[in-house]
Image (spheres, grey):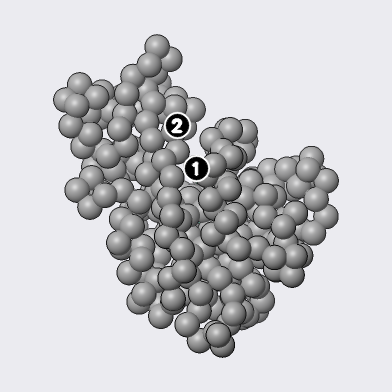
Amino acid sequence: MTVARHSQLIVDQFTRWAKPFSELPIHAEADAMARTLRACALTPDSDVLDVACGPGILACAQAPLSRSVTGVDITPAMIEQAHARQAAAGLENMAWRVGDAIALPFESGSFDRVTTRYSFHHMPDPAATLAEMVRVCRSEGRIVVIDATPSPETQAAYDAMERLRDPSHTSALTLEQLREVGRAAGLREVVVDGYRLEAELSTLADLSDMPALVAMFDADIASGQNRIGVGAWRTRDGINFQFPVSIVAWERSDAAR
Ligand SMILES: C[S@@+](CC[C@H](N)C(=O)[O-])C[C@H]1O[C@@H](n2cnc3c(N)ncnc32)[C@H](O)[C@@H]1O
């Protein structure tokens, strides 16, 4: 698939899901957010860029702890949601841009912290995305990536499940693959953390349209084999599971120490 076609898939998917995504409580879950903010190591002097910011959930949590926060996302409907969230929270030190993570519309070295959450699994080339995040980060700055990281044994089944749920999914890196992308970019790793994020499948997809996705979960639950690696189970209300999420933070190794 061409990059342009993939970008169109992203915009289609997230235009449809912008509002439900922004309203889903799991995306602001307290423990996950606390771990993420800890890894960001924000200070009152930090100028922050959140890449693929979606409806600005992480960016709005970063803003009270920072000098300024800018969110950039390829989907205009997400940026609309972000504006609304900022206004509702009464935050003033924020700016939003529509733009592509692969060619960020900012000068090199513009930010002290460059973060991205739940986006790497949409990127055709995560290494190129990380390189672009490094470019816009100041030399003493920090880059933080938060994403689902399946185990090596479950990665193929996890990706197959995600592609059924969301055709804009490319591949979720394992934690080791994510760490390797940072090493290959010459970064110094400073934090590795993670959490499991519990989700109800019906809140993340229109299941009436996705019998193959439901069948895949049901087979996993019936066999007890956890092939997808998300520990799925059925409740009275439907299928629940846990995203295996990692947080990795790096500093540029060219920074003076
Ligand atoms: C699952 S949402 C995550 C939103 C937000 N980061 C969060 O954690 O709440 C993924 C977001 O990545 C954005 N996205 C995907 N590919 C992108 C790209 N190449 N450039 C900018 N944004 C992108 C989508 O538009 C969507 O808003």
Give percent across and percent down for residue 73.
Answer: 60, 56
Where 189 sits versus 222, above or below? below
Where 247 sits versus 238, above or below? below
Residue at 66 percent of width and 76 percent of height:
110
**Picture mark count:** 2
Residue at 58 percent of width and 48 percent of height:
34
Callout 2, which amino acid? Ala
Between disc 2 and disc 1, whose residue precedes? 1
Where is the N terminus found, in terms of image quarters?
A: bottom left
Residue at the outermost front position: 257
Q: CA distance from mark 2 to mark 1?
A: 19 Å
Whether the residue carrying mark 1 lies under 8 Å from ligand 1 is answered with: yes
Quarter of the figure with residue 96: bottom right
Residue 99 in sight from this viewpoint: no
**Viewer-nearest of labels 2 and 1?**
2
Residue at 59 percent of width and 54 percent of height:
37
Mark number for residue 154? none
Quarter of the figure with residue 22: top right
Residue labelled with disc 2: 199
Dot 2 crowding, Cα within 10 Å, few <14, some 14–19, many 20+? some
Where 196 sits versus 56, above or below? above
Residue labelled with disc 1: 13
Give percent across and percent down for residue 160.
Answer: 27, 42
Q: Is residue 82 left or right of residue 175?
A: right
